Image: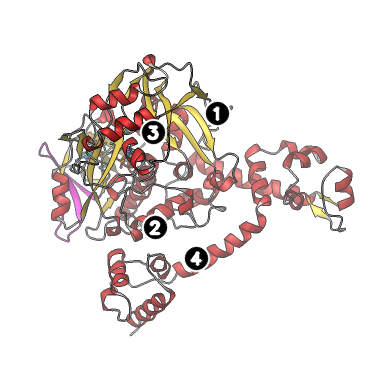
């Protein structure tokens, strides 16, 4: 019998990244999923990136993950969101051609060495005599022994679809749920909880009247996500924007009781920031209308995704609602919207490597950990897959902290705060936004990935070349100097204080752009665009960046204060019972992580620190 190093269960966004990451690190990896054909499928909206999520995609790319390259091959509309705001909060987003995206993911997996794909349903975990995950059992009666398992089953654990008063077991529409696995996780002692998400009806684009609607084009030229993509070759399309109205809201209010969310049929908690239309009508009752983006699902596909119209109301009411919206009066519904409830695992069961504390050599990634979104799932997949491979090889865990990147923020939030609703990434969740920009993800993470074996080859050489180019350009700018009076002669607004400034220092002044420098020193025009962009941002925010770097040093100092792994938090007297129970549930590994728990006060931290020191050296 073949024994794999790592087995990944699930071919969704977490699973494919986990499989590719494990194989990149060098482990013999097997991806077991229900259907080979649905690998890389987008269960809901055909789009990648956005605010906060765009940062995650760039970070996945920096670690040589697949998502950025796949969307570059499949994107049919690229837009940089928040373009008018500061560089820290700009979010790259692209709408995808669903089929092209799936094909791109499958093609990238096909060329990955060390990776086998198996079509099967996993029903149980094999646990060895030491209480560690040691393989999986499939429904067709086969055993697959291995060194570590990564579980990425998304919305499938005891999944149940709701549509009006109808409900049926499903992992997503057209797929069966995973029942056996949920039971085996429960047997192993994991705490399972219920969450919910939903999707809008799909429309036939040929039946939509676009004449009176506002059209929204993408960026020209479209900017790729991956540093390995030279340019976007896929044809680009525009989306249309329409709105709900009072008639729609009245229809919903009159039959609200038939929504499984309001009738009590659904118990799981939904995504607060991506609510259903019935939820929006109730929660924002003063708003006369809500925006709907009509997003084509592909270049050769007439299906349209009405983004903003997620619902689980009865199918006949969905038809009435759709027909009451401008441009959609005669729209044909190809598939009604629906909600899905599923089990997830309390992510406080996890270590920063995404290995579970309860069952060693079992790693979890994706929606099973209480997140929502392809990008959050994929980001966890990279970390879990790499760590499963490193675990088997006896290597050091690959971890990312809150100052390294948004992936670090995501994992730290999950494993310490847990989730009470589906977790979605936003830039506001990060403390060090100015240093963790979407445009410098490679500079922050690629070398870290190289050290763990995740990154090599072309990406490594490109990274080295980019760093050299930035260093050479900085030196070039530092060699060019100018007095205030010379600057004034070139039309630059500089204080006449007699101070000679380098070109880089001139760039720190708010009124001076890189193009002004090129006017004075034309050879600077030969610098690479990405290098110029990087230097311009670093110069513009130099003061803030320095303060943020000092904050990061202080954060890392606290992160260095380890708390012993077996610490009995319940035994610390002087702490409130709420703080004690939070500590016991989250089991923070460092004093810094403890400080971020809700309810922690400086006094409680001091008590904890003294107790930890006493326990460590009695
Ligand atoms: P998935 O993409 O769900 O993949 C799970 C994989 O595991 C599948 O390949 C499945 O076949 C496989 N699998 C499961 N069980 C087994 C088993 N026992 N054996 C073998 N293989 C197994 N996100 C948003 O951000 N906004 C939204 O509005 C939104 N709406 C959604 C609506 C619906 C109806 C659904 C289903 C999802 C929605 N999502 C939404 C969530 C988004 O699809 C997920 O966050 C993302 O796909 C999670 O990725 P994943 O890899 O964790 O799981």
Gap between marks 3 and 1, in whole Å? 30 Å
In the image, is 499 to the left or to the right of 414?
A: right
Give the residue at the far bottom of this rendering. 618
Point out the tag, 3 or 4, that comes first from the N-terminus.
3
| Marks 3 and 2 in Cβ contact (< 8 Å) | no
Gap between marks 3 and 4, in whole Å? 39 Å
| Marks 3 and 4 in Cβ contact (< 8 Å) | no
Gap between marks 4 and 2, in whole Å? 13 Å
Task: Determine crowd level at label 3: few under 14, some 14-19, many 20+ residues with C-alpha closer than 10 A.
Answer: many
User: Is 134 included in the stretch rendered in magenta?
Assistant: yes
Residue under label 2: 412
Give the residue at the far top of this rendering. 206
Residue under label 1: 231
Q: Is mark 1 within 8 Å of ligand 1?
A: no
Q: Check residue 308 in the rendering and tell me which mark sits there, or answer none.
A: 3
Q: Does the residue labelled 4 lie within 8 Å of ligand 1?
A: no
Image quarter where the N terminus lies is top left
Image quarter where the C terminus lies is bottom left
Give the residue at the far left of this rendering. 141
Residue under label 4: 555
Q: Position of residue 53 (x, y in %)?
A: 44, 43
Gap between marks 1 and 2, in whole Å? 34 Å
Q: Where is residue 306 in the image (x, y as percent from the top left)?
A: 38, 27
């Amino acid at each position: 019998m073949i024994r794999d190093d790592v087995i990944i269960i699930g071919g969704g966004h977490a699973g494919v990244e986990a499989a590719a990451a494990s194989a990149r690190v060098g482990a013999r990896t097997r991806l077991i999923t229900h259907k080979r054909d649905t690998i890389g499928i987008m269960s809901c909206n055909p789009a990648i990136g956005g605010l906060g999520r765009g940062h995650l995609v760039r970070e996945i790319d920096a670690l040589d993950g697949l998502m950025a390259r796949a969307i570059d091959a499949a994107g049919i509309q690229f837009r940089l969101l928040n373009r008018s705001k500061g560089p820290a909060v700009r979010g790259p987003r692209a709408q995808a051609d669903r089929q092209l995206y799936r094909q791109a993911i499958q093609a990238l997996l096909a060329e990955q060495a060390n990776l086998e794909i198996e079509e099967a349903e996993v029903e149980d975990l094999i646990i060895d005599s030491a209480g560690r995950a040691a393989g999986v059992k499939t429904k067709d009666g086969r055993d697959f022994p291995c060194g570590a398992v990564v579980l990425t089953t998304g919305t499938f654990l005891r999944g149940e679809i709701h549509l009006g008063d109808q409900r049926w077991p499903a992992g997503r529409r057209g797929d069966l749920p995973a029942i056996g696995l949920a039971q085996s996780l429960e047997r192993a002692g994991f705490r399972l909880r219920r969450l919910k998400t939903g999707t809008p009806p799909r429309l036939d684009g040929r039946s939509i009247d676009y004449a009176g609607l506002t059209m929204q084009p993408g960026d020209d030229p479209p900017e790729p996500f991956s540093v390995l993509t030279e340019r976007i070759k896929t044809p680009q399309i525009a989306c249309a924007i329409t709105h709900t109205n009072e008639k729609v809201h009245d229809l919903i209010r009159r039959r609200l009781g038939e929504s499984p969310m309001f009738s009590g049929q659904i118990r799981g908690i939904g995504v607060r920031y991506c609510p259903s239309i019935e939820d929006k009508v109730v929660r924002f009752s003063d708003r006369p209308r809500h925006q709907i983006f009509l997003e084509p699902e592909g270049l050769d596909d007439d299906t349209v995704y009405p983004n903003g119209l997620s619902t689980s109301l009865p199918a006949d009411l969905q038809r009435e609602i759709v027909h009451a919206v401008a441009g959609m009066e005669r729209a044909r519904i190809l598939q009604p919207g629906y909600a899905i409830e599923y089990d997830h695992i309390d992510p406080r069961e996890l270590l920063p490597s995404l290995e579970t504390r309860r069952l060693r050599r079992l790693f979890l990634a994706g929606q099973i950990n209480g997140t929502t979104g392809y990008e959050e799932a994929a980001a966890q997949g990279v970390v879990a897959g790499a760590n499963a491979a490193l675990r088997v090889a006896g290597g050091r865990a690959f971890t990312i902290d809150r100052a390294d990147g948004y992936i670090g923020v995501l994992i730290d939030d999950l494993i310490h705060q847990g989730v009470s609703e589906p977790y979605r990434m936003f830039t506001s969740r990060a403390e060090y936004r100015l240093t963790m920009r979407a445009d410098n993800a490679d500079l922050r993470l690629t070398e870290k990935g190289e050290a763990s074996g995740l990154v090599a080859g072309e990406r490594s050489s490109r990274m080295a070349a980019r760093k050299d180019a930035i260093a050479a350009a900085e030196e070039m700018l530092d060699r060019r100097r100018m007095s205030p009076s010379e600057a004034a002669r070139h039309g630059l607004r500089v204080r006449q204080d007699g101070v000679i400034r380098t070109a880089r220092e001139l760039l720190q002044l708010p009124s001076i752009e890189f193009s002004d420098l090129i006017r004075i020193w034309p050879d600077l025009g030969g610098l690479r665009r990405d290098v110029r962009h990087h230097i311009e941002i670093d110069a513009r925010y130099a003061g803030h960046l320095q303060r943020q770097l000092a904050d990061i040093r202080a954060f890392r100092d606290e992160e260095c204060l380890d708390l012993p792994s077996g610490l009995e938090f319940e035994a610390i007297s002087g702490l409130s019972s709420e703080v004690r129970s939070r500590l016991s549930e989250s089991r923070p590994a460092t004093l810094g992580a403890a400080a971020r728990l809700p309810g922690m006060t400086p006094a409680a931290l001091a008590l904890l620190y003294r107790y930890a020191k006493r326990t460590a050296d009695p």
